[in-house]
Amino acid sequence: MRTLLCRRHRFPAEIIRYSVWLSFRYTLSFRDIEEMLAMRGISPSHETVREWCLKFGQTYAKRPAPQVSSPATGGTLMKSSSRSMEVFITYGGP
């Protein structure tokens, strides 16, 4: 999310980016995100977080997923996939 998109907002782009990331990565409610930010001394309302997710959510969702590198040493690479995330487990054996 570019800083230009966040112009004229009350909060810095880093806070908006973090809130949108929390919402999409962990599927937290807007009130949960509001509470997490309040614990850090930042006080947006849950409605503000909702508007950020509506406005900037597509930008976040269109980003390419991070690439997971293969294990450096020999071992078994198991992949478990669901709709929301992928988990890679490396087992080197005894």
Image (cartoon, rainbow, N blue to C red):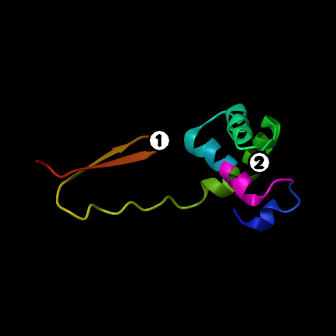
Q: Earlier in the sequence, mark 2 or mark 1?
A: 2
| Residue 1: mark | none
Mark 2: amino acid:
Trp
Principal SS element in the magenta part?
helix
Please give left or right for residue 76 compared with residue 30 in the image: left
Asked which secondary structure carries label 2, the reply is: helix
Mark 2 is surrounded, within 10 Å at the Cα level, by few (under 14), some (14 to 19) or many (20 or more) other residues, namely some
Mark 1: amino acid:
Arg
Question: What is the C-alpha distance between the residues marked 2 and 1?
Answer: 23 Å
Pair 2/1: label in front: 2
Q: Residue at x 67, y 57 (%)?
A: 59
Residue 83 x, y percent position in the rendering: 47, 41
Foreground residue among 18 and 53: 18
Residue identified by numbered label 1: 83
Asked which secondary structure carries label 1, the reply is: loop
Q: Residue at x 62, y 49 (%)?
A: 21
Please give left or right for residue 31 compared with residue 81 in the image: right
Q: Where on the picture, by quarter, is residue 36?
A: top right
Look at the image and give the residue range highlighted in magenta. 10-18
Residue identified by numbered label 2: 52
Please give left or right for residue 74 compared with residue 35 in the image: left
Q: Residue at x 71, y 58 (%)?
A: 14
Residue 45 x, y percent position in the rendering: 82, 37
- Residue farthest to the right, as pictured: 8
Q: Where on the picture, by quarter, is residue 68?
A: bottom left
Task: Tell how many labels.
Answer: 2
Foreground residue among 43 and 72: 43
